[in-house]
Image (cartoon, rainbow, N blue to C red):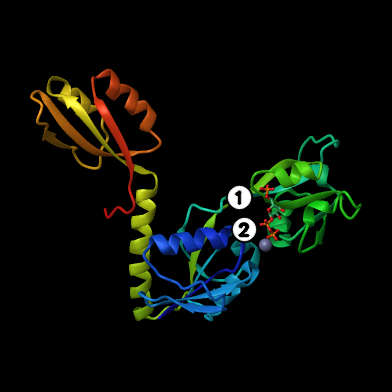
Amino acid sequence: MLRIAIQSKGRLFEDTMALLQEAGIKLSTSKRTLLVQAANFPLEVLFLRDDDIPQTVAGGVADLGIVGENEFVERQEDAEVVRRLGFSKCRLSLAIPKEEEYTDVSWFEGKRIATSYPCILKDYMSSKGVHADIHVITGSVEIAPGIGLANAIFDIVSSGSTLISNNLKEVEVVMQSEAVLIANRQLTPEKRDVLKELLFRIEAVKSAEDKRYVLMNAPNERLKEIIAVLPGMKSPTVMPLAQEGWSSVHTVLDEKCFWEIIGKLKSLGAEGILVLPIEKMIL
Ligand code: PRP
Ligand code: ZN
């Protein structure tokens, strides 16, 4: 049985629950208890505050954790980052009142900065050779300049709307962050095996995420050219259609290059192009 610590609320909670569900792990979330056991996988989920997750994993109370990289780096706990998960992306930035004139990071010399991430900020400031007064507050950091508690803030920025509504402007991005899967460094071989199976499932979900299954009807005389523009996993599947001179072509495409390729396919005479989401992909 593997125990995973995840955040009990917020964006990271939603995204993590969605990932576990897509990995086929059933959790009864009807009753909100601290510890929930999966119905069909040797995993139990411990719901915690994000700040407590790194220590819980490093100390072995939980075997795994899913936590924002920002939180993990700040806590300076010794655990292994097993996989970056690509969701809950945000950045840790310095922001100042929007009417202030900003030149470079030396602006912060002698200034007071409010933050919940003192370790990351301290490292950054010393790497820049700037001496600032770091003032730790745990919530609502963004109101500190407005009430005269600080000259600037260092906090999570996602959409940027919190900064705007507090008349602040982002002046330095210090760190990019996303959710990461962390593990205790002393997992038993049995637990390593369960982790391997969990990672296999996460891999399948993640590789399918930005891929689309594409089907189209193609005139046989342009088939070669059409296949040439398709960067499929291997070669595409080609099947004859009942209508003479036409084939059905199936392949998997990256969402990123999708629009560009669709244009080429159309100009080569492909018709009836269907694009379907892929739920899982085992490579
Ligand atoms: C963070 C941060 C800001 C907000 C920024 O708080 O402290 O308040 O998100 O997001 P935005 O750029 O999209 O406006 P969060 O919601 O993570 O809650 P917390 O501070 O209580 O952890
Ligand atoms: Zn938080």
Confirm or deny contact between disc 1 and disc 2 (CB under 8 A). yes
Identity of the residue furthest to the right in this view: 148
Closer to viewer: mark 1 or mark 2: 1
Q: Residue at x 39, y 53 (%)?
A: 206
Q: Which residue is the site of mark 2? A: 70
Q: What residue type is labelled 2?
A: Asn
Question: In the image, what residue type sits under mark 1?
Answer: Cys
Image coordinates of residue 34 in percent, x first then y, are: 57, 78
Q: Looking at mark 1, is its residue's CB closer than 8 Å to ligand 1?
A: yes
Q: Residue at x 50, y 62 (%)?
A: 16
Is 30 left, or right, of 197 in this rendering? right
Q: How far apart are marks 1 and 2 (CA)?
A: 9 Å
**Does 203 appear above or below 167?**
below
Percent of width and height locating residue 258: 36, 32
Q: In this figure, what is the number of numbered marks?
A: 2
- Ligand 2: which quarter? bottom right
Q: Residues within 10 Å of mark 2 (few under 14, many from 20)?
A: many
Element at label 1: strand
Can residue 132 be seen here? no
Q: Find disc 1 in the rendering and name its residue.
A: 90
Task: Name the disc covering residue 9, or none.
Answer: none
**Precedes in sequence: disc 1 or disc 2:** 2
